[in-house]
């Protein structure tokens, strides 16, 4: 999938999850079988505020034509989605203490994060190749 196609998809997902999680973090967590204490609710809000930022960034990236800019966008997204997946896996393993109700539904979030990490990593490779072709045509 090209970065130009991936960016609006990632923007939509980020804006939906970010908006719901910011406004109703407990409801979002409950939908995935996770029970939150008051601190957990605020952590979800903080995380979802970052997702809103990703959504805006990716939404505004539609018109980007520069390969270097796409590499930066792809790298930021891949790192963010990948780090989120690692944190959730560690939480499920109990590294951060007990997570009440982390069940099969919560693994859907991890799967989504892994998929976006892979897709943005591939987008980076595509942008790198495009930059190489451009540099070769100039030389």
Image: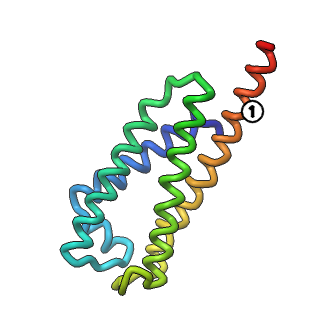
| Image coordinates for residue 38, horizontal then vertical, percent | 18, 74
Left or right: residue 73 versus residue 28 is right
| Residue 31: quadrant of the picture | bottom left
Q: Residue at x 34, y 77 (%)?
A: 34
- Colour style of the rendered protein structure: rainbow
How many numbered badges does the structure rendering display? 1
Left or right: residue 19 versus residue 8 is left
Q: Residue at x 35, y 50 (%)?
A: 50
Residue 58 lies, with reference to residue 29, above or below; the image says: above
Q: Residue at x 62, y 49 (%)?
A: 119
- Label 1 secondary element: helix
Left or right: residue 127 versus residue 34 is right
The quadrant in which the N terminus is found is top right
| Image coordinates for residue 138, horizontal then vertical, percent | 77, 13
Which residue is the extreme one toward the front?
Answer: 139
The quadrant in which the C terminus is found is top right
Residue 97 lies, with reference to residue 109, above or below; the image says: below
Q: Residue at x 56, y 41 (%)?
A: 74
| Residue 123: quadrant of the picture | top right
| Image coordinates for residue 46, horizontal then vertical, percent | 28, 58
**Camera-nearest residue between 1 and 131:** 131
**Mark 1: few/some/many CA within 10 Å (<14, 14-19, 20+):** few
| Image coordinates for residue 20, horizontal then vertical, percent | 28, 56
Q: Which residue is mark 1?
A: 129
**Camera-nearest residue between 43 and 101:** 43
């Amino acid at each position: 999938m090209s970065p130009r196609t991936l960016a609006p998809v990632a923007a939509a997902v980020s804006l939906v999850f970010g908006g719901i999680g910011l406004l109703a973090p407990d409801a979002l967590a409950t939908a995935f079988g996770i029970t939150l204490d008051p601190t957990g609710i605020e952590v979800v809000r903080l995380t979802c505020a970052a997702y809103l930022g990703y959504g805006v960034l990716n939404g505004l990236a539609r018109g980007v034509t520069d390969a270097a800019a796409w590499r930066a966008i792809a790298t930021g997204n891949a790192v963010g989605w990948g780090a989120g997946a690692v944190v959730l896996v560690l939480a499920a393993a109990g590294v951060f203490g007990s997570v009440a109700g982390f069940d099969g539904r919560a693994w859907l979030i991890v799967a989504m994060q892994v998929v976006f990490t892979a897709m943005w990593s591939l987008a980076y490779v595509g942008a790198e190749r495009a930059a190489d072709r451009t540099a070769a045509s100039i030389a």
